[in-house]
Image (cartoon, rainbow, N blue to C red):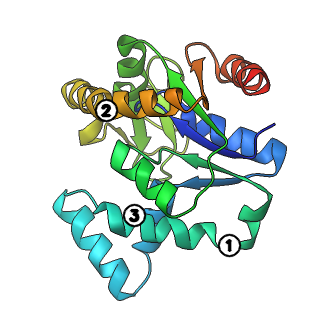
Amino acid sequence: MFKRLVFLGPPGVGKGTQARRLAADFSLAHISTGDILREVIKQNTPLAQRVRSYMESGTLVPDEVVLELLLERMSQPDVKEGYILDGYPRNIKQAYDLEKAGVAVEGVVYFYADEETLIKRISGRRTCRLCSRVYNIYYDPPTVDGRCECGGELFQRSDDTEDVVRARLREYRQKTSPLVQHYKERGVLCEVDASGTPDEVYEKLLRAIEAT
């Protein structure tokens, strides 16, 4: 099996869940730029302050900053056995930046699902204000409506509303379609239908990787 992978897919497709499972089963480093950024802003460094200012103002963290953080993460010992880049690159420029930095990509998995499924997965999310547990009113509803098992109130994040989700999906398609074609032309892309349960999708993922 390839040990240097990129996972692509729209919001709500479940690529993070699949990346964590595959990484655990095959001793690969799961590298998510979202996780990296969340860890960085907890620090008290000039770079952390810069990243925090971008995120708090609602602007995207510049590509060069994300790449710097990504390469720093990839210099750590656990990456030597292989890795999954989860959600990066997000556009053609980032793909070329990776290539210029000498980051090897042996296989790219593109997860897809129909738009209505993605909208239900995201807009159905409800988060506990106390313990941060996430439910889904369609797939994993709480026992008591509006309440977590811990008793905390459940709320919907502002970026999980249906209108916002549809806009995010439109933006993703615009930026990612060329990226999918880029990797397809290089002969490293496989596609996985992400509809179904997490276990069903994982089985599809394993078959797709083995067939690549």
Q: Position of residue 210 (x, y in %)?
A: 79, 25
Q: Which quadrant of the structure image shows residue 168?
A: top left
What type is the residue that disc 2 sits on?
Answer: Tyr
Residue at (83%, 45%) from the top-left corner?
26
What amino acid type should be assigned to the residue bearing mark 3?
Answer: Val
Q: Residue at x 42, y 41 (%)?
A: 127
Tag 3: Cα neighbours inside 10 Å, few (<14), some, or many (≥20)? some
Give the total of numbered labels.
3
Observer-nearest residue: 158 or 145?
158
**Residue at numbered disc 2:** 172
SS state under label 3? helix
Residue 65 vertical placement versus 44 (above, below): above
| Residue carrying label 3 | 66
Q: Quadrant of the C terminus?
A: top right
Which callout, 3 or 2, points at the residue further toward the start of the chain?
Answer: 3
Report the disc number at residue 157.
none
Sequence-wise, the earlier of marks 2 and 1 is 1
Measured from the top left, where is residue 90 in percent x and y? 39, 43
Q: CA distance from mark 3 to mark 2?
A: 18 Å
Q: Secondary structure at mark 2?
A: helix
Label 2 environment density (alpha carbons within 10 Å; few <14, some 14–19, many ≥20): some
Looking at the picture, how far across and down is residue 79, in whole percent? Answer: 71, 63
Q: Compare residues 46 and 207 and report the one nearer the observer.
A: 207
* Quarter in which the N terminus is drawn: top right
Say above or below: 171 vs 93: above
- Pointer 1: what residue? 76
The vertical placement of 24 against 7, above or below, is below
Task: Inspect this view and state whether residue 197 appears.
Answer: yes
Q: Are marks 2 and 1 in contact (CB under 8 Å)?
A: no
Residue 111 placement, left or right of 58: right
